[in-house]
Image (tube, helix red, strand yellow):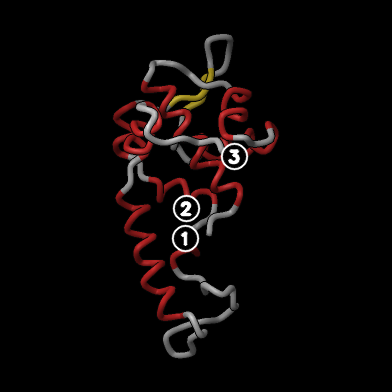
């Protein structure tokens, strides 16, 4: 469904948000370990998230990555997906065909239309904050 980069981006953002709720900044190494992602790959993803304004980075000894509580409540998971994977997930063919539409549908077209619409609703109504709170309270997890 999502690219590996997008999965890591969502997990990294939620981890950073959880740390931020505890008034802590997360380091690259800490994030990489927490989400089970290679450090170099994580660094590239975090750079994209910083450039998009989803998370903030502060350099130096007391630096790290963070996101304010107000930003967590405002920003949606859909924003992370759009930064990393774009919005093709809402329109592309569920079977991976290059062209699929209502006029010329693939065998699964009608089923995937509703799945994509449901996914869009979930992503556009789920805040980073709501996911971070579940993680902080131990109700959810990021690592297998």
Q: Quadrant of the C terminus?
A: top right
How far apart are labels 2 and 1 at the CA level? Answer: 5 Å
Q: Which residue is mark 1?
A: 87
Which residue shows up at 41% across the image and 36% down it? Answer: 140
Q: Residue furthest top?
A: 61
As drawn, is 127 to the left or to the right of 60?
left
The disc label shown at residue 82, or none: 2
Which residue shows up at 44% across the image and 22% down it? Answer: 19
Q: Which residue is mark 3?
A: 45
Secondary element at tag 3: helix
For this rendering, which residue is in front, 144 or 66?
144
Which is more N-terminal, label 1 or label 2? 2
Q: Pointers 2 and 1 in contact (CB under 8 A)?
A: yes
How far apart are labels 3 and 2 at the CA level? Answer: 13 Å
Which residue shows up at 41% across the image and 80% down it? Answer: 110
Which residue shows up at 35% across the image and 27% down it? Answer: 137
Secondary element at tag 1: loop
The part of the image, by quadrant, that contains residue 29 is top right
For this rendering, which residue is in front, 16 or 45?
16
The percent position of residue 141, horizontal first and vertical second, equals 46, 35
The percent position of residue 100, horizontal first and vertical second, equals 51, 82
Q: Pointers 1 and 3 in contact (CB under 8 A)?
A: no
The part of the image, by quadrant, that contains residue 21 is top left
Which is more N-terminal, label 3 or label 1? 3
The percent position of residue 55, horizontal first and vertical second, equals 46, 32
For this rendering, which residue is in front, 130 or 63?
130
Which is more N-terminal, label 2 or label 3? 3
The percent position of residue 20, horizontal first and vertical second, equals 41, 22
For this rendering, which residue is in front, 60 or 85?
85
User: As displayed, is residue 125 above or below residue 10?
Assistant: below
User: As displayed, is residue 1 above or below residue 127?
Assistant: below
User: As displayed, is residue 19 above or below residue 103?
Assistant: above
């Amino acid at each position: 469904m999502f690219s590996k980069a997008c999965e890591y981006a969502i997990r990294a953002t939620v981890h950073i948000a959880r740390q931020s709720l505890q008034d802590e900044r997360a380091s690259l190494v800490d994030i990489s370990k927490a989400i089970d992602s290679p450090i170099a790959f994580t660094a590239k993803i975090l750079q994209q998230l910083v450039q998009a304004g989803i998370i903030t980075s502060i350099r130096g000894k007391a630096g790290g990555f963070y996101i304010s509580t107000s930003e967590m409540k405002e920003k949606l998971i859909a924003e992370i997906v759009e930064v990393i994977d774009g919005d093709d997930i809402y329109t592309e063919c569920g079977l991976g065909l290059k062209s699929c539409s209502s006029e010329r549908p693939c065998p699964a077209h009608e089923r995937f239309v509703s799945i994509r619409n449901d996914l869009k609703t979930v992503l556009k109504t789920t805040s980073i904050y709501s996911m971070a709170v579940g993680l902080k309270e131990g109700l959810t997890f990021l690592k297998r």
